Every structure is written in structure tokens, then in C-alpha cells.
Image (cartoon, rainbow, N blue to C red):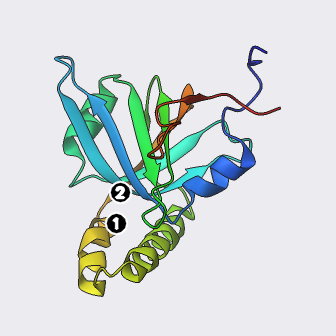
Amino acid sequence: MPQMKSDPLLDAKQAAFLGGPVAINVASHDAAQIPSIARAYGCRISADRREVVVFLSKRCAQAILRDLAAGAPVAAVFSRPKTHETLQIKGARGRIQPLQAGDRAIMRACGAAFSAEIMLLGYSASFSDALMAPANDDAVGVAFMPDAVFEQTPGPKAGMRLEPKP
């Protein structure tokens, strides 16, 4: 059944998963197709699940922010360390925007959830703190509308495009 324009690609369970505890990496490319990638420090999903906003450190994400400002597409991968459950979301364009009220709190909550999970897996608090430290930098949001969602959990369904559930 073809998707109607008004149907969000993300279902409620997927949207909740994106909130963590997950590692988030965001990728794009420049005009010469040279990839750029950066770690994101949390995300916000719109109430209607039609927009994803990932939070990037300006200092650590200069290349990808440059590529997105030039109109390149965006892909974000969300992976839970404990289970390796992973979703990839792609969008035709990412829109760079200032943080909104509450975004820093979302970043702190996402970072705390991620840190707690990796420490349960044996990583040290100092490693976790260093990994999440750029979340304290001058950050921006990258907003995009998902065009495609893919299952990327290792296994037989990895790479499968997910269609919205009615």
C-alpha cells in the first residue's frame, strides 16, 4: 500500500528508540562525494514524528555542518550499545538551526542514558565522560524530515527499508 504524504515514516516505538540510550552518528558528503561524519549528542523528535533534530557540536562537526549548509543529504544512525539494535534514517536535506529551549536538557538526558548503558558494558566513567564531553560545546540542531528508515541491526534484516505501519 503506498504511503500517503501525511503518514509519518517513524512509528511511536521507533521514535521512542531514537531517544536512547543510543549512540548517534550523522553523515553527509561534500560536492566531490567525500563523506563527512560526526557524533550527535541526542535528538528531538517532533510530536507528529515527521521531523528529527539531532544535536551536533559546532567544534567537532565542522565538515558535516559545512556539507549540510551546502544542501547535501543527511543520514543518521541510532544504535543501542547493549543490543546493537540499530536504525538508519535518511533525509534529502538537513536544516541547521540554533538550539531551542529544552534542547540542552535533552542532550544531557540522552548523554546520561548512553553513559549509563556503556558503563554497564564495562566502559569506565572517564571514557564515557570524554566521549560525551563535546555535548557541552556550542551546539546546533540539524533538523530533517525522514525520507527513508532502514533496519540496520546486525542480522538477516540489516539493510531492509522499513515502511510505515498503519
Figure quadrant of residue 148: top right
Q: Residue at x 48, y 28 (%)?
A: 91
Q: Is the residue marked by circle 2 packed among few (<14), some (14-19), or many (20+) residues within 10 Å?
A: many
Relative to 8, 127 lies left or right: left
Given residues 96 and 133, the one toward you in this image is 133
Vertical position of residue 121 compared to residue 92: above or below: below
Which label was assigned to residue 139?
Answer: 2
The kind of residue tagged 1 is Ala
Judged from the image, the secondary structure of the residue bearing numbered disc 1 is: helix
Contact, CB < 8 Å: mark 2 with mark 1? Answer: yes
Figure quadrant of residue 93: top left
Taking the view exactly as shown, the residue that stands out farthest to the front is 156
Q: Which residue is mark 1?
A: 135
Q: Position of residue 152 (x, y in %)?
A: 47, 41
Figure quadrant of residue 52: top right
Q: Residue at x 25, y 48 (%)?
A: 61
The answer to whether residue 97 of the structure is visible from this angle is: no
Vertical position of residue 106 compared to residue 67: above or below: below
Mark toward the viewer: 2 or 1: 1
Q: Residue at x 37, y 81 (%)?
A: 119
Disc 2 to disc 1, how far (Cα)?
7 Å
